[in-house]
Image (tube, rainbow, N blue to C red):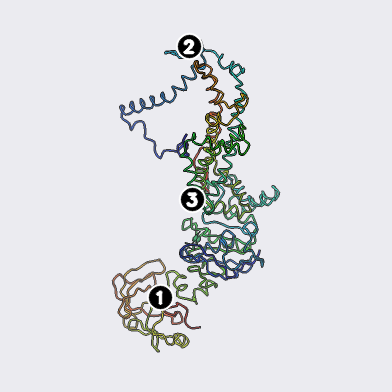
Amino acid sequence: MTLDASSLQMVKPERRLKRSDRSPLASIGLHAALVVASLVAVFPVFWVLVTSFKPDARAVETSPQLFNESSLDNYTRILGGEKGAFLTWFGNSVLIALLTTVIAVFLSATTGYAASRFRFPGKRSLLMSFLVVQMFPFAVLIVPLYNILIALGLQGSSIGLVLVYCTTAVPFCTYMLKGYFDTIPTDIDEAGRVDGLSPFGVFWRLVMPLAKPGLAVTSFYAFLTAWGEVAFASAFLSAADESKTLAVGLQVFVQQNRTEWGHLAAASILVAIPAVIVFYLVQRFLVTGLSSGAVKG
Amino acid sequence: MAEVSYVKASRVFSGNPPVRAVDELSLDVADGEFLVLVGPSGSGKSTALRMLAGLEDVDEGAIQIGGKDVTNVPPKGRDIAMVFQSYALYPHMTVAENMGFALKLRGVAKTEIKAKVEEAAKMLDLTKYLERKPKALSGGQRQRVAMGRAIVREPSVFLMDEPLSNLDAKLRVETRANIAALQQRLGTTTIYVTHDQVEAMTMGHRVAVLKDGLLQQCDTPRALYDRPANAFVAGFIGSPAMNLKTVPITSEGAKLDGVTVPLSRSALDAAGGLDEVTFGIRPEALGIVPSGEEGMEMTVELVEELGADALVHGAVKIGDSSQRFVVRVDGRTPPTLGQHVKVAVRDHTEIHLFHPETGERLEA
Ligand SMILES: Nc1ncnc2c1ncn2[C@@H]1O[C@H](COP(=O)(O)OP(=O)(O)O)[C@@H](O)[C@H]1O
Ligand SMILES: [Mg+2]
């Protein structure tokens, strides 16, 4: 998953091309392209949504109909616990994802701030290693991480998994936040120190509020890192049903010779909801120019 | 309120070679004084101020505020307030919150903060803007908020680092006067950094001139103007700059294109043994004389009309080379371009002599 601040930020175009400036042909072409792109993006989600309302038998029809035979049966069965401890998994996932978000963002914010403001030996190599770490495929890391967790006595526990997620989220988030902190003038830090803040006070009361857009993006990234992840979760959590996360639990719908498409689709929709909520909460901070007005005129 | 002392304070930035941004600065600022640190860009003014604020380490020497050694005290323990060149307002707080922030950190009661902020806002004509964010203010208003943030604290020392450099010319002159008046009224010791010698001369009780981290001279504006301690100060203070030329001297005086400018006994004694000196004379101490009289032959190359006065730039031959001089003349009758005029020293007491190599002032 790659996310960066610029792609999520809403930029105001300098000057909008007016509708009348375009020839009709260009207009048609443009709209056609946009319609196709939107369809490509929306269609799979739409298909899943449609499927989630239908019984398995009709899941793979060629001409899906949204309104005939639609029912909430799949949802009631999943939420009712007939198909495994869905609500428990859900709780586990929420807990693990939120913990990951909080810990990873806090660690990366403090690290990123130090990297942005202080000069210390090894700073360049630290930042470099953060980049290099990103280049390893996750699968390679499973065994070494597992050994480390055993050494720490954390195998099978949620906390262990949270720490594992942090190892992937923290380097990226640190990098992003450092970049964001770099855009906040150091004069603000100094004004705060003269006004009576301790170095941590400067970080907490001035820099963090000003870095909200950066924090929003990194929180979202950290949340998603943990929310939809399967490989680490299946390797590091204990096999007991009640300790599974959603992504792992969903596999019960896909068995060797039979796939419960309806249930899988309904569960997928349910899984997507928290991610959408987090995105919604976070996106209002994704506005540029929070720190404008700090300096000069 | 407090007095401030730099005691051989130095700041050395590591590098190759290391930069002595402030070099053994010794300076005493009296309680209630308005001291201006002035110098060209890169002379170490900001560094000196930041050392006093505790934002920059003091590598050698010491700094005292109110008689107490604060060399190793963090900024929050120094009871100072600083106005930054960029203003450094907190963008996420309103004007009122910006101004009251330091008091809030000190745990002052809300009602008292409000009263103090309102009082300062009234003084600075900011009452209307108290609930706005800095983003929604003009440059001049932001500058006043930065001032207000400092005033509300009632610190023992104000530090200001080029607080006017982001304002337009007219507002700058206006604000200059306001700051000076405000300082007068509050009586708070103030250290003010600027690169603009006009600002320095008009605002400071005393002015300290820095160059390459070294203190050149610290004195009242008048004394700086009348008796610059060296050629650098002579050339830096005053606008337009003093004419500074290296000229040969004899026992009669300094030799300029055909004329010998007689020098005082003490000046000649001080220059004893030298056959050249740096001769300095301000444009207003020179004048154009009728063509029959004795004077330097000057070819007019540029006339700057300032209204009341005009500045005449022209070339004068000294020895084999042609040197530029600036003469201040009456604005109503300036010479024309390319004209040959005679220039003479109007006031012989306003001649400054400096050592040609060290630049030190000659004569007592
Ligand atoms: N953080 C720093 N690291 C290295 N050199 C610095 C640093 N800050 C300032 N300097 C150097 O110190 C000298 C004085 O800088 P400064 O005090 O900002 O000058 P001024 O405010 O008079 O323009 C300059 O030569 C500058 O390059
Ligand atoms: Mg400066």
Q: Would you place residue A138 above or below residue B113 in this image? A: above
Alpha-carbon span between mark 3 and mark 2? 58 Å
Quarter residue A75 falls in: top right
* Mark 2 Cα shell of 10 Å, populated few (<14), some (14-19), many (≥20): few
Q: Earlier in the sequence, mark 3 or mark 2?
A: 2
Q: Nearer the viewer, residue B92 or A282?
A: A282
Residue type at mark 3?
Arg
Q: Position of residue A256 (x, y in %)?
A: 50, 18
Whether tag 1 and tag 3 are in contact, CB under 8 A, the answer is: no
In this view of the protein, which residue sits in the foreground, A35 or A103? A103
**Residue A161 percent coordinates (x, y):** 58, 34
Q: Of circles 3 and 2, which is in front?
A: 3
Residue type at mark 2: give it: Arg
Q: Is B180 on the left-hand or right-hand side of B240?
A: right
Are callouts 2 and 1 both on one chain? no
- Name the residue tied to disc 1: B244
| Tag 3 residue | A124
Badges 3 and 2, same chain: yes
Q: Chain of mark 2?
A: A
Q: What residue sits right under mark 2 in the picture? A: A58
In the rendered view, tell whether residue A168 sits above or below residue B118.
above
Disc number lying in front (2 or 1): 2
**Which disc number belongs to residue B295?**
none
